[in-house]
Image (cartoon, rainbow, N blue to C red):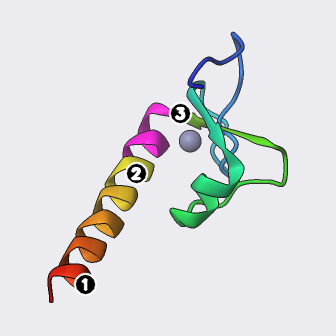
Amino acid sequence: MGRIDKGAKCSVSSCGREAVRSLSTEKVKVAGLKVGNEKRAYLCKEHYKEYKKKTKKDKQIEKWRYSA
Ligand SMILES: [Zn+2]
C-alpha cells in the first residue's frame, strides 16, 4: 500500500494535482473526501493531509466515546 504509478493524478473531484499516495477508496470516502468508484483512490499532498486529519479526528472521537 502507498505505492503509486508515476504521473497519477489525485482522485478527488475537481482536484487533479499530482498524487502522492494511493489508498483504498472506501477509507477515503469514510474520511469524507469525494472520490470516484475505482478500487484505489489517489490523493495529492494536500488531500492526503486532509485525509489524515479527518481519520485522526475520528479516532479521537472513538477514544472519547469508549472512555466515557
Ligand atoms: Zn487532491
Whether 1 is drawn above or below 56: the answer is: above
Q: Quadrant of residue 40?
A: top right
Mark 1 vs ligand 1: CB under 8 Å? no
**Image location (x, y in percent) of residue 42:** 65, 35
Residue drawn 25% across and 84% down? 65
For disc 2, the marked residue is: 50
Q: Are marks 2 and 1 in contact (CB under 8 Å)?
A: no
Residue closest to the far top: 6
Which residue is disc 3 drawn over? Answer: 44
17 within the magenta span: no
Q: Residue at x 57, y 65 (%)?
A: 30
- Position of residue 37 relative to residue 59, above or below, is above
Q: Residue at x 27, y 76 (%)?
A: 61
Q: CA distance from mark 2 to mark 1?
A: 23 Å
What's drawn in magenta, residue-wise? 44-49
Q: Amino acid at mark 1?
A: Arg
Q: Secondary structure at mark 1?
A: helix
The residue sitting at the left extreme is 68
Asked if ligand 1 lies within 8 A of label 3, the reply is yes
Q: Is residue 55 left or right of residue 14?
A: left
Counting from the top left corner in percent of width and height, residue 64 is at 19, 79
Which badge, 2 or 3, is on the more N-terminal residue?
A: 3
Q: Which numbered circle lies on residue 65?
A: 1
Q: What is the three-letter code of the residue carrying label 3?
A: Cys
Indicate whether residue 47 is drawn in magenta. Answer: yes
Label 2, residues with CA under 10 Å away: few <14, some 14-19, many ≥20: some
The image quadrant of residue 49 is: top left
Residue plotted at (31% across, 64% down): 59
The residue lying furthest to the bottom in this view is 68
Quadrant of the snapshot with the N terminus? top right
The amino acid marked with disc number 2 is Glu
In which quadrant is the C terminus drawn? bottom left
